[in-house]
Image (spheres, coloured by chain):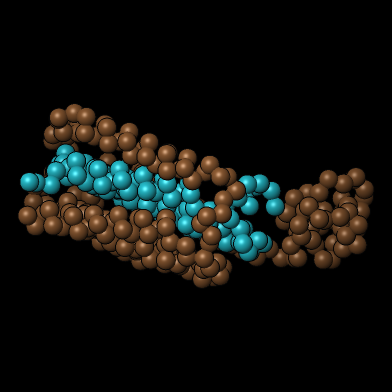
Chain colours: A brown, B cyan
Amino acid sequence: MVDIIVFVVSAAIILTGAIGVIAARNPVHSALMLVMTLFGVAVQFVAQEAHFLAAVQVIVYAGAIVILFLFVIMLLGVDKAEELDVGRLTAQRPMAFLAGAGVLASVLVSLLAGDESITGAREVGRAIIGGEDEADFRQIGRLLFTDYVLAFELTAILLTIAVVGAVMLARRVRGEAVDADTYLPEQARRRRIRETPVLLRTPVVETSDDMAEANSGGGE
Amino acid sequence: MEITANWYLILSAVLFSIGVVGLLIRRNPLVMFMCVELMLNAVNLSFVTFSNALNDVGGQVAVFFVLVVAAAEVVVGLAVIVAIMRRRPTATADDLSVLAG
């Protein structure tokens, strides 16, 4: 009985949050609704005895990722309401709902069509090395450092690359940024090397010695 | 009545569909990113459900990797959005249809 109550309440929280994410006009409200959904999923993790993942879900998702979202929203000052009704493609919204319904229907049919359980395969027979009562984080840790150690190392590399990439992307380039669409060759000739214009895209111009010099000086 | 794995999987499917719809109807790139997070969470929920139903911890390890990849993806994606928004303060996804500067 308690199982059912926990499931129903957490499912209501999850679905309310999810609908709130896509229906809220203000991005800040969307982010807060996302926190609600993430907490609901964490509750369901606990209900399915994935205690470690529930803690990680709260710490990493709600604690780090959503905060990062809010940080960017506030930093950019885009926390103003968006007109949901205006669309460039008029058929986009009905098509979107159709696509969502299609995904839902295909999954539900495959879930509910058969009488058997999902795969019919019980007890794949891995992992429970230390017995049934061993804590889940022990088992996860053991698997991470034995069977999945290569993937674990690759995630370390991935995180390093992500950090370097984020720093490179968010860095302010030196020199005044110019729009390549409005960047005229005369401006390039006037600026010369000293101001080092940062070309976002190489403009199509006749190659002269001046331009080549300015471009090589400003290449970033 | 008992809570079976199917209940969790149906909830996961609904959550995933909401994420799909949100990704398609919203035009703010930040909100679209949040919808991707919704879809990732739906998949995580079904991973944990299978892990519990089949008595295999491998599903939980998969969720761990999904979390790491999601964190990396959010970091890079938000850096891209910051770089774009710095030049065009009111960028929606429609304005970003051309990748050129």
Nearer to the camera, B22 or A65: B22
Image spot of residue A55 (x, y percent): 25, 61
Considering depth in this image, is A140 or A191 the residue closer to the camera?
Answer: A191
Q: Relative to B84, is B5 on the left or the right?
A: left
Q: Is residue B37 visible?
A: yes
Q: Nearer the viewer, residue A46 or B5?
A: B5
Which image quadrant for residue A98?
Answer: top left
Percent coordinates x, y for residue A30 in the rendering: 42, 62
- The residue lying at 61 percent from left, 62 percent from top is B90
At x 37% / y 52%, what residue is drawn?
A: B38
Query: Can residue A142 be seen?
Result: no
On screen, residue A27 versus residue A205, left or right, reads left
Residue lying at 66% horizontally and 46% vertically, measured from the top left = B98
Q: Position of residue A160 (x, y in %)?
A: 47, 55
Number of numbered discs on residues: 0
Relative to A87, say whether B79 is above or below: below
Task: Report the residue at 88% width, 60% height from top.
Answer: A187
Locate residue B62 relative to residue B29 in the image: left or right. left
Asked if B57 appears above or below A63 in the picture, the reply is above
In the picture, residue A183 is in which quadrant?
Answer: bottom right
Foreground residue, A11 or B86?
A11
Across and down, in percent, residue B76 comes to: 51, 55
Please say if A39 is above or below A104. below
